[in-house]
Image: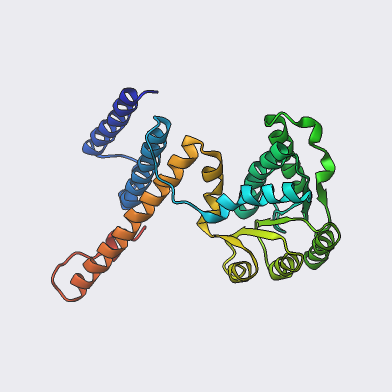
Amino acid sequence: MNDRDFMISAGGISLAFLIYWFFGHPYFITERIVMFLAIMVFSGTLLFFIRKARRGEEIFLRTIPGLKAVEEAVGRSTEMGKPVLYVPGIMDMDQVETVAGVIVLGHVSKMTARYETTLNVPVSRAIVMKAAREACKESYLMEGRPDMFHDDMVHYLTDEQFAYAAGVNGIMVREKPAACMYMGKFYAESLILAETGNSIGAIQIAGTASQAQIPFFVTACDYTLIGEEFFAASAYLSGRPELIGGVKGQDMIKVFIIGLILAGVVLRLMNDVGLIDFSIINFLTVK
């Protein structure tokens, strides 16, 4: 669908809703109008920036040092003849951080295939093992090196938290990888892993949205992707227009919401002191 057809479709939907509203809007719960408008505005914002990216217009993404260091870490492993250790967290695929970690693994495995570097991915969940294997296999195929892929590069250790941490630590001490990457959902084992990696002199890159674990990664690792930097990693690394446009659209939605919050505070204050008779709380309350 080109821009002209898109605008005609959007205008037609808007006109149809106005006509429907003018004729009494049967079956529409008027108390939910704020929610309806929010969904329409947010959806329209995302679609606008995704289409803008697909047209080839430049969309600025802030440079994330941790992601730029990924290729440096793989290159260092290649020069030293040592493997890359990738840890996708300890949780299952129902956690968004694990999904993001597997996506980043796909990009890392492309680099290891390109540079012919050994990749070691210990996991703690069977479903994560299957997803990670498929991500690595696809990456090696895309790089034209299917012969280098083998199932054992992604292997299962255990579901137990500290047993898994002990197993990964053993791999670090025995194989001494030149690069250790921790991308996913972590708990108390985060500092154990990062300190062991630091003791063997590996370059370490971590990414997580677990607020309690971010300080440990920041302390012990060379680079850390904090919160939404981690979720934006797939867009940053892949360069796909729909992902880049989605990240930009989400940022604009956040700016819009911050503006609404500030406006709501001002309106609430004016209502409390009696300057206006409009209650923003009653307007926004979903009944």
Task: Report the residue that reaches farthest toward the bottom.
Answer: 273
Residue 207 x/y as whole percent: 60, 58
Image point (62%, 63%), residue name? 222
Residue 219 placement (x, y as % from top left): 61, 71
Q: Residue furthest left?
A: 275
Residue placed most toward the observer, 191 or 65 = 65
**Vertically, is 59 above or below 93?**
above
As drawn, the residue found furthest toward the front would be 79
Quadrant, the N terminus: top left
Rendered view: 90 above or below 103: below
Q: Position of residue 108 (x, y in %)?
A: 66, 45
Task: Compare residues 114 and 50 and report the one nearer the observer.
Answer: 114
Q: Position of residue 98 (x, y in %)?
A: 65, 52
Q: Residue at x 36, y 37 (%)?
A: 48
139 left or right of 45?
A: right
Q: Which of the 4 image quarters holds residue 202?
A: bottom right
Q: Is residue 146 left or right of residue 30?
A: right
Q: Is residue 217 left or right of residue 21?
A: right
Which of the two residues, 25 or 276, is positioned nearer the viewer here? 276
